[in-house]
Amino acid sequence: MALYTSFRRTRASRFLAAVSGYSATVVTSAAVSVAVIPIVISTSGAGGWSAIAVGQSVGSIAAVLIALGWGITGPALIARALPDERAQLVADSVVSRLWLSALVLPVAAIVAWISTPLYPVSALLAATNVATVGLGLVWYFVGVGSPRQLFILDTLPRALGSILAGGLLWATRSLELFAAVQLLFSCGAVAISIRASAGRCGDETNWVWSLRWSLLTIRQQMLPSATAIATSVYGALPTLAVAWLAPAGVGVYALAERLGRYVTMAVTPLHNWMQGWVPAAQDSSSINQRIRAAILAAITVGGGAGIALYLLGPVLGRLLGGGTISLDSMLIAGVAVAIAATTVSRCTGGACLIALNDAKSVAISSFVGAGTCVLALGVLVPPMGAIGAAMAMAMAEVTVLLYQIAGSTNLSHNR
């Protein structure tokens, strides 16, 4: 009995250590981002904030294209691989993503430029800054179970860059300098992460820079990449749709969406842990139990997160908006529903269905969500503006969740 109790305490301590480690990354990133928003709005106005938000939305799509779906399958592949195999996975992923960057980054820069005529350079730099996330190795650090390295090598450089950029923006009121400094530190974070992970993997890595070889890696990652692309599209499209169809509402929607993103970040440590815990089950009975437990936990956390966002959103919006932007309760309600559904679907898809070797259902759910979002945006944004965009996002996320829950339930019963 004493041995069993000790074992459970050990597992609990490991869980708390892992979640706490990942939480440090989330808390730091969120705190720095929250601190920077009022500086951007107060120095550059709603127009400057809108340009940064649009650029970041464009960059988020570019980042997913460059990332090639490694964030979905990478943690499991790294966790199961031997050290030498990890080395080759890192090398192949980096080379193939650099080739993709040469194609994707110019297109993202052009889209950001033409979408924000008042601050085109700032939007271009903001898009490129966010796009660099696609070159990062967050999935590698999650796979090896090293939240400490994730924080030191990726989170900290980006956070320091944002702090310095915010200070320079306050002093100079140059939005272009703000975005350029952020981009510089983000590139540094990518370079440091690649250097450190390559050194940790060993010296026997075969770095093949041939485009033909990289195309093989790209082909292997097509399904998870398609999943990530579809998810990114319906995640970023609402901001762009408002910019194109109801431009007066960009600043309002961008602020509400940013609050929702912070809530999503807050539950990310739990999701990271689930990605390793659910697939690690030893037999069918255990994995079914873990799937049920994970979904129940995600529903509880997601529901609580949505309620908290709905209740606190208007207050936080006034604080972050500096009194110049206020958030409608209907707008916050739509974002809250979307965030609650997203919290659960990240568990049912990224943890449960992947553990059941059903990446196909995850991909299909993302395509269904993207289609729902596009149709809803076209119908709701012209008459409702930012509120219509929030409602469209909520409809898309709920659709994804319902599809994934059905897939998890059917597969777990048929194992």
Image (spheres, rainbow, N blue to C red):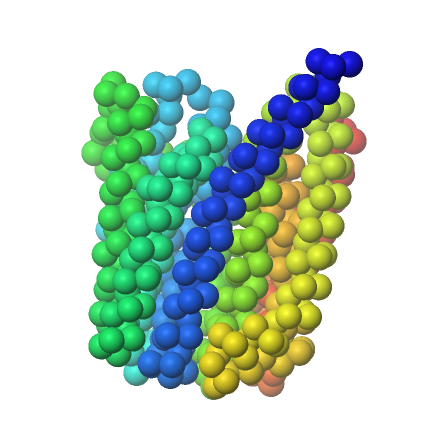
Q: Is residue 42 visible?
A: yes
Near-viewer residue (413 or 162)? 162
Residue extending farthest to the front is 2
Q: Which residue is drawn at the image coordinates 23% and 64% (left, top)?
A: 180
Residue 390 placement (x, y as % from top left): 60, 71
Q: Residue 313 sits in which quadrant?
A: bottom right
Residue 413 placement (x, y as % from top left): 78, 31
Residue 357 placement (x, y as % from top left): 60, 31
Near-viewer residue (175 or 403)? 175
Q: Which residue is drawn at the image coordinates 43% and 55% (left, top)?
A: 29
Compared with 28, 10 (above or below) is above
Q: Is residue 376 left or right of residue 294?
A: left
Q: Which residue is drawn at the image coordinates 41% and 18% (left, top)?
A: 82
Q: Is residue 100 visible?
A: no
Residue 186 placement (x, y as % from top left): 29, 53
Q: Quadrant of the C terminus?
A: top right
Q: Which residue is drawn at the image coordinates 31% and 50% (left, top)?
A: 157
Q: Residue 389 sits in which quadrant?
A: bottom right
Q: Is residue 57 left or right of residue 356?
A: left
Near-viewer residue (343 or 231)? 343
Q: Quadrant of the N terminus?
A: top right
Count up the numbered dots: 0
Q: Is residue 315 left or right of residue 115?
A: right
Q: Residue 85 sits in which quadrant?
A: top left
Near-viewer residue (100 or 83)? 83
